[in-house]
Amino acid sequence: MACNNTQHSQQTKYKRTGSIERLDPALDAILDTNARAEIIAEGFEWSEGPLWIESEQMLLFSDVPTNTVYKWTEKKGMEVYLRPSGYTDTTPSNSKEPGSNGLVLDGSGNLVLCQHGNRQMARMDASLNQPNATYVTLVNQYNGKRFNSPNDAVYNSAGDLFFTDPPYGLPAQNDDDPTKEIPFNGVYKVTPNGEVTLLANSITRPNGIAFFPGEKKVLIASSDPNAANWYMLNVGDTLSTPTLFYSATDERDGLKGLPDGLKIDKNGNVFASGPGGIWIFNQEGNVLGKIKLDEAASNVALSADEKTIYITNDGYVLRLKLR
């Protein structure tokens, strides 16, 4: 029987990895339990911050230790997009993770980066299709003290920027680092005019952050091995106490990964990196299923139509089709 070479090459272009664990029948409406992730790029030290850019049909993502943002397209595969991405000083960095982490678009379609090494939120001073490693500082201090290392971020529809600030970009990567100026690890809101508000200071390792539909609540991951939790925070203009959404502290079982980056779809379903891969919750905090992976997953991105999920998976970047 004759073989369609084009079809055959498309089917075998990417290696596949992982498996799906179905814990609730509601998962069937989100993805096929027989689906497997495709490895679309590999060779990174620690991939992070995936962001799908619909207008350019490209995926951007950070390799934090190498201070680089990469671009992936179906046509050309992987290319360097920005370098340096998170640390721009001419003196060598003494951080193990100096690069950008989370990536997000502002309301005008500009690329905004969580810059570990520069300890700030910054906007790329160039267009998306002609990138250049020049940056405009959006915010770098709270009450006159430098941030630790902004990690992940999200905008609301009013143009307010919300971000988390754990210590992973500092040289010692912990709270005892002598360069740490703020005594806690905060969650912040920045208005379009640059006003900074501390929203939470009680999450030990705030990491991934995303809005539930309606933008009145955010979900925040805590990448603390001793408090491997997800928290819900009511969005306001004052310091608030988060409530527990789900705890995976007792479900790690030697699995690689911790609560880290996450995204929430238009139906309120949560795709969150956690122990053993990507955890899928409904907005009530029930685990519907998991995308089980061998290596630690750091973050996820959804395509504009929410039919594809992209996963940064340590040295790999993965793609998985959703329903």
Image (tube, helix red, strand yellow):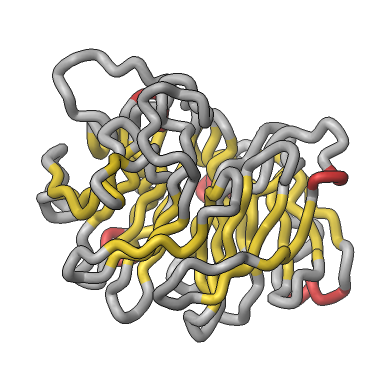
- Front one among 138 and 308: 138
Residue under the point 49% across and 45% down: 185
Quadrant holding the C terminus: bottom right
Q: Quadrant of residue 88?
A: top left
Counting from the top left corner in percent of width and height, residue 224 is at 66, 40
Taking the image as shown, residue 56 lies to the left or right of residue 17, namely: left
When the figure is inspected, residue 232 is found, relative to residue 124, above or below; the finding is below
- Front one among 149 and 264: 149
Residue under the point 30% across and 38% down: 119
Counting from the top left corner in percent of width and height, residue 19 is at 78, 47
Q: In this rendering, does residue 136 appear at all?
A: yes
- Front one among 13 and 112: 112
Tell me how many marks there are. Answer: 0
Residue under the point 65% across and 72% down: 269
Taking the image as shown, residue 298 lies to the left or right of residue 237, namely: right
Residue lying farthest bottom?
214
Taking the image as shown, residue 176 lies to the left or right of residue 71, namely: right
Q: In this rendering, does residue 4 appear at all?
A: no
Counting from the top left corner in percent of width and height, residue 243 is at 68, 67
Counting from the top left corner in percent of width and height, residue 221 is at 61, 54
Residue under the point 51% across and 48% down: 6
Q: Quadrant of residue 181?
A: top left
